Amino acid sequence: MKAQWIDTVKNTRIPQLLPLVGLTPGRLGSFGPCPACSEERRSKGDRRGSCGVHADKRGWKCHRCNVKGDAVDLISWTHLGGSSRELTKEQWADLRDYCEKLGLSDATQRTAAPAVNSVNALLGRTRSRKPASPPAEPPQSSGGGGPFAWRDGLAEECAAALWKDRSSEVLQYLREGRKFTDETIKEWMLGVIMIRGEPWLTIPLRDESERVVNIRFRSVPPARKTYRVCPGRPLPLFGSHSLGNDLGGNVIICEGELDVIALWQYGLNSSVVSGTAGAGAWKDEWLDQLEPYSGFVLCYDNDEAGEAGAKAYAEKMGLDRCSRAVLPRKDAGECLQAGVPSESIVRVIDRAAPMFGVGFKKVSEYESDIETLVSNPDKLKGISTGSSKVDKCLGGLRPGLMILSGDTGHGKTTFATWMLWQQARTGVPVMVTSFEQRPVYSIQKLLRMQLGGDFTKVSVEDRAAAMGALGRLPIHVLDHYGQMSAVALMQAIRYAVRRLGVKVIMVDHLGFLLDSEGSDKVSQIESIIRALAITGYSLDCTIMLICHPKGLPQGQTRVTIHDLKGSSGIKQDASEVIIVERAPPKDKGKNKRQYPATWIHFDKIRSEFGIPGSKAFLAFGPFSCRYADTWEETPEGRSGALIVH
């Protein structure tokens, strides 16, 4: 029978609980840091707290490590360092006392019913155990974080405690269970701490300068494998102090700390690292540390979770840079325990298979892919542009290269920027470049779109609110203007797609990618066009490249695909060629119109869902820089404005 006080605490609303347990509320019902993985933000591009609160305010979930629970779990993580489902009977008593101190339960309503019937029932053990000769227990911190709280000097004390009783259970586990030598144990400063009468292995976590900044606590057999860290402390990349200066070399990535230590004993003592938050969880700062290195050998576990973790890492860092090493046993630790010789380990790592391998399939094997596309129209037809007229002609934004052109002053950059803004509003990450002018000029267009008018005519507070709203959108601006090599641009695009999840990129414009000292401009253009097209397809993103036309022949009213520099390469490699043609207001004649508009011509459409040679007529709000299918849908039209020359 569940104790009444637990139900009382469970009904506590999470936002009311946050200040009591030292957590910080964030935007849009979020909070941080996560009491399990210590992450403060969801990602670089999403500044909300790592944890979200359920709609009923009585549940929470971390969007980085996927730990979730109710108010009882939140208190258990912050006070005792773990989920309430893993607490012993004594820890439940401690948790109840703590809830009473916080005023969340009433001490006068205590009943004799325990929170759990027994430790064995909760943890699934067949027998209880006590170490025959327990190691000395380092003194515990009285601050927040419970028994796993951080304290300066704790790692050193735990390491010393391991050697005070050489027959201790943890030392025996390291020597006989893990097959670590005493040299290895001392090199990594492994130790022991007693928590509620149970021994835990301690693994110091060092930063790049070798300072111990956190501790990884691991249960030892026969207890169920459980990990903890000191709440609220930094979580460094394990082994980062071993990263070498050879950026052209490979870094070996393991799934856990004990695997790194096992490979060290095998003689691989340089550039071997692992995360400290599970196989699939990689903090942005860890990826930033590893980004400069040219290659990675992934020694993840040979199981389903390991495969998923390796794939997730490779997608972040680039399949072309990653190789998969399949060890003779599940992981490096088991190889060491089984006595696999070091020559075998080195050979497997040296012969790691690239993860971008090419294979062959029968047509019938693609049946599930076809059904997936049918069930996901955005992938089949493309992402909606935000205009039904444009979608009808284009079919939607699809991976590949889109060329945008038009005569000078006809709004090709504004149209491209509007398309990016529309995507960002629906949650699609986008990348903005502005080579011809400083990026702040692109920001001005975005600010007009966000405000729906002239940003100089509103208050400072309104501008700040609009800038804040833009900052919350997944818009990533490449902070560079002027000439840029095509190679540097490709690197920036690959990084943005891998690390920021970008799906649509605007490149403004082609002329700034050309080598001014090169003589054959046509060959340069064709080479860049092909490279961008291949990049778009391979990275599953849409690249919108703005191109300036050659001079129009006499009597020709608009730019066409034939008027573009390097048009032969564009015709061959671009997925779409779109021409923007301004249509000013007309106060005279048969088709009078009192507002500005734009013709969008679709000279080339590769998608079978688009219409090559079609065109769309869009209203254009000159103050808001927004396009719409009708004038009434623009901010200017909704306000009743009529703009006539």
Image (cartoon, rainbow, N blue to C red):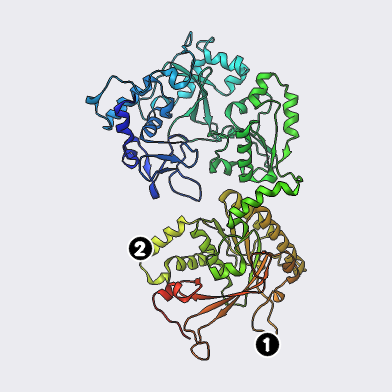
Q: Is residue 385 left or right of residue 457?
A: right
Measured as percent of width and height from the top left, residue 232 is found at: 43, 35
- Most extreme residue toward the top is 132
Task: Answer whether residue 517 is visible to the viewer in this image.
Answer: no
Q: Is residue 358 left or right of residue 375?
A: right
Please tell me which of labels 1 and 2 falls first in the chain: 2
Residue 194 higher or lower than 270, as above or below: above
Mark 1: secondary structure:
loop
**Image quarter in which the N terminus is found:** top left
Task: Answer whether residue 209 is visible to the viewer in this image.
Answer: yes
Q: Which mark is residue 62?
A: none
Measured as percent of width and height from the top left, residue 265 is found at: 66, 23
Local packing at callout 1 (Cα closer than 10 Å; few below 14, some 14-19, many 20+) is few
Tag 2 residue: 461
Of the residues shown, which amino acid type is indicated by label 2? Glu
Measured as percent of width and height from the top left, residue 104 is found at: 28, 32
Of the residues shown, which amino acid type is indicated by label 1? Gly
Local packing at callout 2 (Cα closer than 10 Å; few below 14, some 14-19, many 20+) is few
Residue 536 higher or lower than 275, as above or below: below
Q: Name the residue rendered at 53%, 90% in the picture.
A: 590
Q: Which mark is residue 555?
A: 1
Q: Name the residue rendered at 50%, 75% in the picture.
A: 620
Which one is in front, 153 or 117? 117
Q: CA distance from mark 1 to mark 2?
A: 50 Å
Mark 2: secondary structure:
helix
User: How many discs appear?
Assistant: 2
Measured as percent of width and height from the top left, residue 231 is found at: 43, 32
